[in-house]
């Protein structure tokens, strides 16, 4: 049996959602925030190419999310990790 093909966009979504857990230093005016960047470098580079985070290649231990990155990070966090209504 062959291995299923990996959907890199879904991996990127999961990484972005997990960044929401580690947000810090949020600027109340720009809504930009930093998140720890201890994730797979290929995923981080793809998020940068998608303009969801600023360039992760630097000495800082965190990365700044763009405005769109902040919106998507929060939405994906709730979508992927929010409790589902099981009463039906």
Image (cartoon, rainbow, N blue to C red):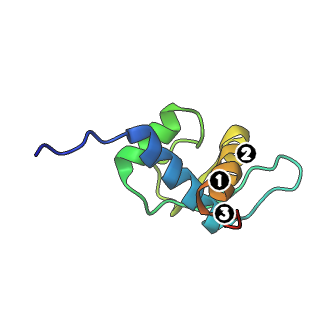
| Mark 3 lies on residue | 84
Residue 2 as seen in the image, left or right of residue 76? left
| Mark 1 lies on residue | 79
Residue 52 as seen in the image, left or right of residue 40? right
Front residue of 83/21: it is 83
Disc 3 + disc 2, Cβ < 8 Å: no
| Mark 2 lies on residue | 71
Mark sitting earlier along the chain (3/1): 1
Element carrying mark 2: helix
Mark sitting earlier along the chain (2/1): 2
Residue extending furthest left? Answer: 1
Q: Position of residue 52 (x, y in %)?
A: 60, 39
Q: Nearer the viewer, mark 3 or mark 2?
A: 3
Front residue of 34/3: it is 3
Residue for point 47% across, 51% down: 58
Residue 3 as seen in the image, left or right of residue 86? left
Label 1: few (<14), some (14–19) or many (≥20) C-alpha neighbours in 10 Å:
few
Q: Nearer the viewer, mark 2 or mark 1?
A: 1
**Quadrant occupied by the C terminus:** bottom right
Which of the 4 quarters of the picture holds residue 63?
Answer: bottom right
Residue for point 49% across, 48% down: 56
**Numbered circle sitting on residue 54:** none
Front residue of 77/26: it is 77
Residue extending furthest right? Answer: 29
Q: Position of residue 35 (x, y in %)?
A: 60, 60
Q: Position of residue 57 (x, y in %)?
A: 44, 47
Mark sitting earlier along the chain (3/2): 2
The Cα atoms of the two marked residues, 3 and 1, are separated by: 9 Å
Element carrying mark 1: helix
Disc 3 + disc 1, Cβ < 8 Å: no
Q: Nearer the viewer, mark 3 or mark 1?
A: 3
Element carrying mark 3: loop
């Amino acid at each position: 049996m062959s291995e299923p093909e990996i959907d890199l966009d879904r991996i990127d979504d999961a990484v972005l959602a997990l960044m929401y857990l580690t947000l810090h230093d949020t600027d109340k005016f720009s809504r930009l925030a930093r998140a720890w960047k201890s994730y797979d470098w290929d995923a981080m580079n793809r998020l940068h190419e998608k303009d969801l985070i600023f360039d992760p290649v630097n000495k800082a231990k965190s990365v700044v999310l763009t405005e769109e990155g902040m919106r998507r990070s929060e939405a994906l966090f709730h979508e992927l990790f929010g409790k589902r209504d099981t009463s039906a």
